[in-house]
Amino acid sequence: MKRMMVLGLGCVFLLFLSWTFLGCNANSNPTPDPTPTPGAQATPTPGGEPTPTPGADEVEDQVFFLHHSTGEGLVTAGHMRATFDTYNAAHGTKIEFWDHGYNGDGLRDPAGNPTGTNYEIPDDNTDPEGLYRLWTDTSPGWTHSRNVILKNYEVIAFKSCFPASAIPDAATLQQYKDWYLAMRDFFDTRTDRVFVVMSTPPLHRLATNATEAANTRAFANWLSSSAYLSGHPNVVCFNLFDHLARADDGSATANMLRYDYEGSHTDSDSHPNTLANETVGPVFAQFLIDAAVDH
């Protein structure tokens, strides 16, 4: 509290009373939870830049994660920021984690606070086709979103949500591969950045079938294999599918969301539950930290 110039004993007395009153009420408005409820804030301003972090010249790496609802669970219920904080405290580092959900939720800073801005991802499209366009399309909307991400972050992770795991046939699987190969061609032009591709999360057993599930496993295996990654040192894969799916064990629910990770055993909602997020969130956070440190 700033000191004030006083001109007389009467003013000193009034100032003493003011200080006393403020001290009694200093805790009447506790600091809000840094992890806001999705959608609780006003719609962020499109196209804004993140507010520079104080002492940004000391930040070693800015890590960015583009996601939708399944990613939201990993970030919040999975306490990803706590993993970053713990690592930084133990190693004397300053690796910052930013994340961006739907455009309506926008960008959050390393403390988990909404910045009031978003990156105008066209149509909120983070399906494989949307990610392909994010990294390759030359039209103004996609170019703007791409450039603002590339400008601000050294490690960039992105994922599609579980609807993209409904891969019905070999033709669709090949289309996914073609899109990710085209993305990789772009990543090769930006070796100053690390790109973290992610396999899609599995579908609930009540929302898919054996063919779709097997095709999604095949895509995840390919994306995380040397066939995709070898010779491209700035491209790494976090195999989210493998962390969340039942093994390819020949069972009726092989390659589908693990039973113990289902939010409901009677509803087909494919969002992983709290146990899944608490289990996988810290693993993913450490993967991003390692990507920053190793590159």
Image (cartoon, rainbow, N blue to C red):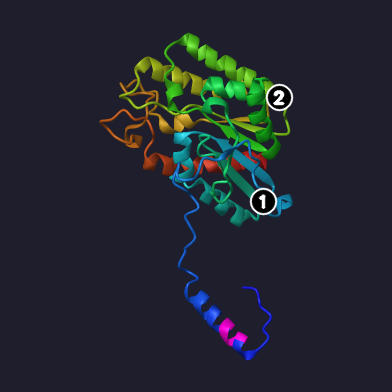
In the visual, does 84 lie left or right of 137? left
Q: Residue at x 57, y 37 (%)?
A: 65
- The residue labelled by disc 2 is 188
In the visual, does 110 lie left or right of 39? right
Q: Secondary structure at mark 2?
A: loop
Cα–Cα span, label 1 and label 2: 29 Å
Residue 226 visible here = no
- The crowd level at tag 1 (other Cα within 10 Å; few <14, some 14-19, many 20+) is few
Q: Type of residue at label 2?
A: Asp
Residue 277 found in image quarter: top left
The magenta segment: 11-15
Q: Residue at x 70, y 36 (%)?
A: 151
Q: Residue at x 40, y 29 (%)?
A: 245
- The residue labelled by disc 1 is 53
Residue 18 is covered by the magenta coloring: no
Q: How many marks?
A: 2
Residue 217 vertical position relative to residue 47 in the rendered view, above or below? above
Label at residue 71: none
The picture places residue 192, in percent across and down from the top left corner, at 73, 34
Instruction: State whether the magenta stretch is mostly helix, strand or loop.
Output: helix
In the visual, does 133 lie left or right of 248? right
Question: Which of the two residues, 193 or 237, is positioned nearer the viewer here?
Answer: 193
Question: Which of the two residues, 134 or 71, is positioned nearer the viewer here?
Answer: 134
Residue 287 found in image quarter: top right
Nearer-N-terminus badge (1/2): 1
Specify the quadrant that holds the C terminus.
Answer: top right
